Image (spheres, rainbow, N blue to C red):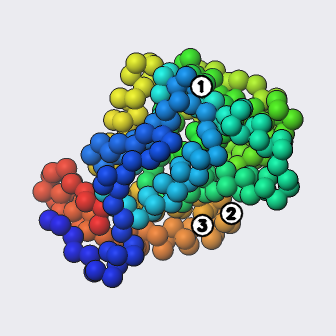
């Protein structure tokens, strides 16, 4: 059954990505899963000023796109992302004034903010090189599937910069712990896939030839769940970082009460009574 949406809400709070064709990466939709592929394999998929901005804008729009339930982010050609392009970003940065540099660093940070704010859970499929801003994109995702041959590196100290880039000092310790995050951010060293899995950065490991299929299957499984509830879980996971335990418990009480008003909650109950598997629709 198609849900009725008031016309004034549909115009302002709903968007469609039908026909969407980005200029600086690939996009496809596979059922309820949106797939982003960084597609500069000859350079190990580095980011540019333009791709940063286009990725940021896409994740912002995804807040209003109902038909996309989850996201997979991957790289082409056996690598995830080598970070900012040395020639197209790093070189020009050395010639910029302070106001322009600050505009750039705020723009890159806005990509992470947009990834954390979009309601869809993001699964990063990580193979080969995952460095610099690529490591940040993987970190900003909700879930990560890696390969044993993947190499994770927060390279900022290697180029004379601080490790505190794009939220790394806030997010990375929450994934792998303060001590291990300090190791990576001070040294800039590479972390192999097996070690990244042992440290909890990778949630799962897959063989390189099965990586995309594994990430897609996981994303599809999540997409088949109660997507309104998943969006609430993502929001709470992010917001509760800055809450006391008491405030978090109260926030979760309110969030769960809202979810109890959804049709998906009703569907789950009736399916349980009928000894059937619920079919969730995200409303």
Tell me the tag on residue 183. Answer: none
- Residue at position x 61%, y 38% from top? 47
Q: Which residue is mark 3?
A: 248
* Circle 1 SS class: helix
Q: Which residue is mark 2?
A: 242
**Residue 173 screen position, x and y as percent:** 71, 43
* Circle 2 SS class: helix
In the rendered image, which quarter contains the N terminus?
bottom left
How packed is label 3: few (under 14 Cα within 10 Å), some, or many (20 or more)?
A: some
Mark pair 2, 3: CA separation: 9 Å
Q: Is residue 146 visible?
A: no
* Residue closest to the eye, 165 or 58: 58
Q: Earlier in the sequence, mark 3 or mark 1?
A: 1
User: Would residue 195 be found to the left or right of residue 185 on screen?
Assistant: left
Q: Which residue is mark 1?
A: 43
Q: Quadrant of residue 95?
A: top right
**Residue 14 screen position, x and y as percent:** 36, 69
The answer to whether 175 is drawn above or below residue 117 in the figure is above
Mark pair 3, 1: CA separation: 44 Å
């Amino acid at each position: 059954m198609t849900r009725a949406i008031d016309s004034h809400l549909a115009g302002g709070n709903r968007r469609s990505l039908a026909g969407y064709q980005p200029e600086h990466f690939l996009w496809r939709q596979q059922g309820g899963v949106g797939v982003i592929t960084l597609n500069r394999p000859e350079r190990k998929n580095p980011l540019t000023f333009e791709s940063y901005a286009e990725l940021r804008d896409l994740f912002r729009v995804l807040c209003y796109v109902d038909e996309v339930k989850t996201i997979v982010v991957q790289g082409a050609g056996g690598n995830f992302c080598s970070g900012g392009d040395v020639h197209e970003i790093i070189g020009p940065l050395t010639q910029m004034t302070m106001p322009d540099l600050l505009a750039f660093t705020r723009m890159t940070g806005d990509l992470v903010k947009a990834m954390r704010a979009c309601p869809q859970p993001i699964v990063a499929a990580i193979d080969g090189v995952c460095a610099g801003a690529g490591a940040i994109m993987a970190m900003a995702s909700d879930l990560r599937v890696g390969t044993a041959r993947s190499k994770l590196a927060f390279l900022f100290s290697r180029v004379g910069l601080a490790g505190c880039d794009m939220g790394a000092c806030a997010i990375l310790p929450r994934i792998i712990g303060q001590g291990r995050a300090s190791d990576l951010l001070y040294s800039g060293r590479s972390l192999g896939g097996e070690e990244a899995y042992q440290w909890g950065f990778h949630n799962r490991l897959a063989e390189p030839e099965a990586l995309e299929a594994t990430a897609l299957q996981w994303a599809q499984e999540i997409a088949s769940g109660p997507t309104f509830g998943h969006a609430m879980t993502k929001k709470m996971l992010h917001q509760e970082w800055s809450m006391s335990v008491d405030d978090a418990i109260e926030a979760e009480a309110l969030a769960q009460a809202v979810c109890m008003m959804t049709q998906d909650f009703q569907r789950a109950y009736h399916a349980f009574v009928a000894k059937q598997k619920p079919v969730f629709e995200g409303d």
